[in-house]
Image (cartoon, rainbow, N blue to C red):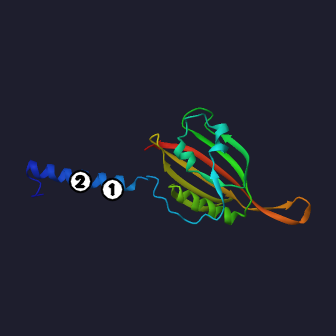
Amino acid sequence: MAILRTKRSRWVAGAVALVVASVGTLAGLPAGGKRQNLPIDMASISAAADFSPITPPGVVPKDVLTALLIPQKSTKTGWHNYDQGNGQYDRAITISVQADSSSTKNFFKAALSDMAWKILSSQNVSNGYEILGLHSGSDGHFWEIGVTISSGSLVPRSGTPKSTDSRSSVSLRLLQYESA
């Protein structure tokens, strides 16, 4: 190319290419996004208390746990320690939510967006519905949340055999993704 014959023109072209590549890379990084203020149709609380029995202090930044909301009328039904203390944090809780799967799905989509989680995907899966989100933590790592909402089931209300409550089983798997 005739334009790149001099050392200075090659340097300028290289600098321009570096700036373009840097801007493109930075634009593509998930930074947690902005709060969306979508309507959340259920009262919510932080999931920090539900994760605390399986999370040593200081491992997950407070800003990440505070940004993870669950419906207020949920009951923790279990937990799983996938990492077993080896490697990056990877743990999950399961909760039972007093709502059908559609309402529960709407809650988590709105709550994650409102709390600056970048929604990577939301789709039907074989056992229900899955939402994947990414959040940048104050510790310099990205944190990924996988919310799996199992198909809702009808549970008989105590004392009234013909009445039922709709409940959804939800798994929230939180893992340390990579350095920000």
Residue bearing mark 1: 24
Q: Quadrant of the C terminus?
A: top left
Q: Position of residue 162 (x, y in %)?
A: 90, 67
Q: Give the x, y percent position of residue 139.
A: 47, 39
Name the disc covering residue 151, or none. none
Residue at position x 53%, y 46% in the image: 64
Residue 17 circle label: 2
How crowded is the residue under tag 2: few (<14 C-alpha within 10 Å), some, or many (20+)?
few
| Closest to the observer, 43 or 170 | 43
Compared with 1, 174 (above or below) is above
Q: Amino acid at mark 1?
A: Gly
- Please tell me whether mark 1 sits on a helix, a strand or a loop: helix
Residue 73: image location, x then y, percent: 72, 55
In the rendered view of the protein, which quadrant contains the N terminus? Answer: bottom left
Left/right placement of residue 128 relative to residue 156 reads left
Closer to the camera in the image, 174 or 12:
174
* Residue sitting at x 20%, y 50%: 15
Q: Secondary structure at mark 2?
A: helix
User: In the displayed image of the protein, which residue is found farthest to the top?
Assistant: 85
Q: Looking at the picture, which amino acid does disc 2 mark? A: Ala
Tell me if I can see residue 169 in this picture: yes
Residue 121 location, x and y as percent? 54, 59
Instruction: Tell me, yes or no, whether the two marked residues, 2 and 1, touch with CB atoms within 8 Å.
Output: no
Q: Is residue 9 left or right of residue 157?
A: left
Disc 2 to disc 1, C-alpha distance: 11 Å
